[in-house]
Image (spheres, rainbow, N blue to C red):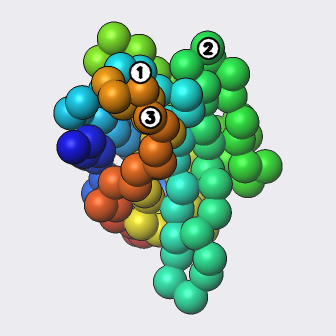
Amino acid sequence: QVQLVESGGGLVQPGGSLRLSCAASGRISSFNTMGWYRQAPGLERELVARITVFGATKYADSVKGRFTISKDNAQNTVYLQMNSLNPEDTAVYFCKANIVRTSGTTLEYWGQGTQVTVSS
């Protein structure tokens, strides 16, 4: 059993910052990639940022220069530092991880989502 536990969402004013965390726990050997997706009402879920176990990153164009993804391999945890937030960043943010389980199999997991609201 593998679980992803997200934290750090909330309400913030435009121009503010938030830091999201996603910790993977359970029968984990390591991970290949971990990342963040978001889904706003009426829109499709989209990639925000992802990072590989080796540190390679990919960002959506809309967040480049404002968001930074980082990781702690030992803790199987990924972070998303979000700066200069604007109302268009309002969405439910989901963590997604490609996990190598102790059994040797690789599966994708999703977190339950955390709400980020940017509003004055």
Tell me, for residue 54, which label it has, or none: 2
Residue 19, horizontal then vertical, whole percent: 38, 38
Q: What residue type is disc 1 on?
A: Ser
Tell me, for residue 63, which label it has, or none: none
Residue 84, horizontal then vertical, whole percent: 57, 45
Residue 104, horizontal then vertical, whole percent: 42, 26
Q: Quadrant of the N terminus?
A: top left
Q: What residue type is disc 2 on?
A: Phe
Report which residue position mark 1 lands on: 30
Question: Which image quarter: residue 57?
Answer: top right
Q: Residues within 10 Å of mark 1 (few under 14, many from 20)?
A: some
Tell me how far mark 1 sits from mark 2, CA to CA.
11 Å
**51, 15: nearer the viewer:** 51
Q: Residues within 10 Å of mark 2 (few under 14, many from 20)?
A: few
In this picture, is 65 found above or below 9? above
User: Mark 1 vs mark 3: which is more N-terminal?
Assistant: 1
User: Mark 3 vs mark 2: which is more N-terminal?
Assistant: 2
Q: What residue type is disc 3 on?
A: Thr
Residue 51, horizontal then vertical, whole percent: 60, 30
Foreground mark, 1 or 2? 1
Tell me, for residue 105, which label it has, or none: 3
Question: Which image quarter: residue 44?
Answer: bottom right
Q: Residues within 10 Å of mark 3 (few under 14, many from 20)?
A: few
Tell me how far mark 3 sits from mark 2, CA to CA.
19 Å
In this picture, is 62 found above or below 65? below
Q: Which residue shows up at 34% across the image and 54% down it? A: 111
Q: Is residue 41 visible?
A: yes
Q: Is residue 16 visible?
A: no
Left or right: 104, with 4 as reference point: right
